[in-house]
Amino acid sequence: MGGSVIEYPVIWLQCATCTGCSVSVLNSVSPSIKNVLIDEVIPGKHINLRFQATIMAGAGDMVIEEMEETWQNKKGSYVLVVEGAIPTAGDGAYGSIGEKDGKVVSMLSRVESLGRDASATIALGTCAAFGGIAAATPNPSQCLSVGRIFKLYNIATPLINIPGCPPHPDWFVGTLASVLLQGLPEPRDLDEHKRPKAFFAQLIHENCPRRAYFDEGKFAKRFGEPGCLNELGCKGPVTYADCPLRRWNGGVSWCIGAASPCIGCTEPGFPDLLSPFYQKLTEVALPSIGQSPRGGV
Ligand code: SF4
Ligand code: SF4
């Protein structure tokens, strides 16, 4: 890289997460994660990942100091990525990231302080975007989404939600590249749940290769049978994502391509409002085709 490359600091916090979102992004195929982190994703612009607990070589006070230094010295110019929901019970006692002056610092406190001073925040994965599995009933640690935390603490930092359990790597890398190339998305570029329309504008059901079966009323009664998966619980009619077109694992396959119903993993309210996963959509109190079941915390 030449001297004219602009560095874009990124701090990636992992809160109440299974780390699946990290694993998914690390499996990015084009560009590879090596390209994302080492090369200029956009000519002249380089993502400078300052803190990411899963892939950092360092640990302990050293990396926490690095994160805090980036926070203090790059206010208003770093991008914050949050993976996982944020535990709020007991004033955030159920999850911490590092220490300050010998005292643990809660995830809640980190998201609040780092979120307030970021140029933009990306809530990566359904837990960060909408609460997800971490906030599912009974939610003893009172996990909330990043959006809810921002609202509670009057944080006005622009927020982009990239849901998915896990999110597709392209959804994250594409969004980050778009921010570097064109700046923050306009409100018209995001849907009502702050999801980029570039990836979440169409229903799974609109582009599903089994749609002809649905229109013909030919439904699979058992797993492995040909036919639409509606009677086996498919949530494609209420789920917005481009999985049928993009597919997963470098375009190899995707949920319905592997004969599994879509379980609605990109929707607010997942998993509670999309459950039971293998029960027909019309037999539960869900809205009709195209209407999101809403929810999310
Ligand atoms: S219900 Fe599911 S399997 Fe059937 S056409 Fe719609 S998205 Fe495809
Ligand atoms: S097909 Fe449905 S469940 Fe599968 S990844 Fe896409 S949105 Fe999630």
Image (tube, rainbow, N blue to C red):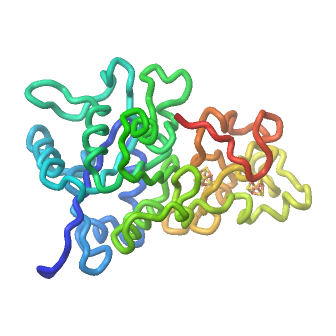
Answer left or right for 198 relative to 184: right
250 relative to 157, above or below: below
Q: Position of residue 282 (x, y in %)?
A: 82, 40
Which of the 4 quarters of the picture holds residue 65? top left
Q: Position of residue 125 (x, y in %)?
A: 46, 48
195 relative to 6, above or below: above
Residue at 30% x, 21% y: name it. Answer: 93
Q: Position of residue 192 (x, y in %)?
A: 58, 52
Which of the 4 quarters of the picture holds residue 7? bottom left
Total tally of numbered discs in the picture: 0
Answer left or right for 26 relative to 282: left
- Location of the N terminus (image quadrant): bottom left
Looking at this view, is 31 or 156 the one in front?
Answer: 156
Looking at this view, is 232 or 46 the one in front?
Answer: 46
Q: Position of residue 211 (x, y in %)?
A: 79, 62
Residue at 21% x, 62% y: name it. Answer: 48
254 relative to 230, above or below: below
Residue at 15% x, 80% y: name it. Answer: 4
Answer left or right for 61 relative to 294: left
Answer left or right for 107 relative to 224: left
Among all residues in the image, which is located at the extreme right? 216
Residue at 77% x, 62% y: name it. Answer: 210
204 relative to 142, above or below: below
